[in-house]
Image (tube, helix red, strand yellow):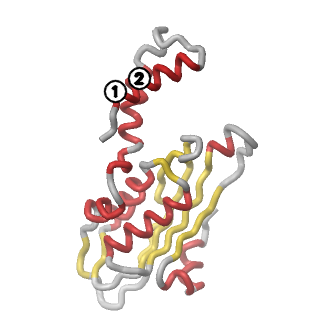
Amino acid sequence: MIDTKAIEEHIRGILVALGEDPEREGLIETPARVARMYEEVFEGIAYSNSDIAKMFGKTFEAPANAGPVIVRDIEVFSYCEHHMALMYDMSVSVAYIPRDRVIGLSKIARICDMAAKRLQLQERLGSDIAEIMTEATGSPDVGVVIAGTHSCLTARGIRNASARTVTQTFCGAFRTDRDLQKMLTEGVR
């Protein structure tokens, strides 16, 4: 459970430390607004990967000889655990090879969204999504490719506005099958 009252107090303290007046008109409600925002954007912290797999693990009987299922361009955002900076313009592509069961397509997007609602590293986000998909689908054959922009690169430090980070997580057959990898990575920018 996220302690919104503690967040409000700390945000107020940060405003003071920045030299701002938390009592000025534009800032009076800021601590409460930030606390509500954190409650929403960090919702995934409250759940383990296994919890998320159970939440969104509704499956259906797979058709015989089902080939890879690929969902591309799932939009998510997250916050970098190093600077609490926004990771944005993130596109996640997820693929798996069904065994006996298939998962609802919207559940794949929900898994990605919930796993992103944590302080994250992009590399761990891919690994978390793959782990959740493996548990939810019962298939060890999962691939996840994420392309994203990190404000810790674009808005501070080096300030390289065009930098994009691409990460790949391959499990099971995706580790060694170049054709499966290519199907998943085509068009990723």
Quarter of the figure that contains the C terminus: bottom right
Q: In what element is the residue under mark 2?
A: helix
Q: Position of residue 39 (x, y in %)?
A: 36, 38
Residue 85 falls in which quadrant of the image?
top right
Identified by mark 2, the residue type is Glu
Residue 7 location, quadrant: top left
Taking 99 as reference, is 129 left or right?
A: right
What residue is pinned by disc 1? 5
Snapshot quadrant of residue 112 = bottom left
Label 2 close to label 1 by CB (< 8 Å): yes
Relative horizontal placement of residue 174, taking residue 43 as reference (left or right) = right
Q: Is residue 6 above or below residue 44?
A: above
Residue in the image at 27% along x and 67% along y:
57
Q: Tell me the number on the disc at residue 138.
A: none
- Please state the horizontal and vertical placement of residue 45, each as a whole percent of the image: 38, 49
The answer for how far apart the CA atoms under marks 2 and 1 are is: 6 Å
Please name the residue shown 31% across and 71% down the image.
136
Mark 1, other Cα within 10 Å: few <14 / some 14–19 / many ≥20: few
Residue at the outermost bottom position: 65
Which residue is drawn at the image coordinates 28% and 85% (left, top)? 100
Mark 1 residue element = helix
**Residue occupied by mark 2:** 9
- The kind of residue tagged 1 is Lys
Q: Nearer the viewer, residue 38 or 5?
A: 5
Residue 115 is left or right of residue 162, and the answer is: left
In the image, residue 81 sits, relative to residue 4, either above or below, namely below
Badge 2 density bin: few <14, some 14–19, many ≥20, Cα 10 Å: few
Q: Is residue 103 or residue 134 the one in the foreground? A: 134
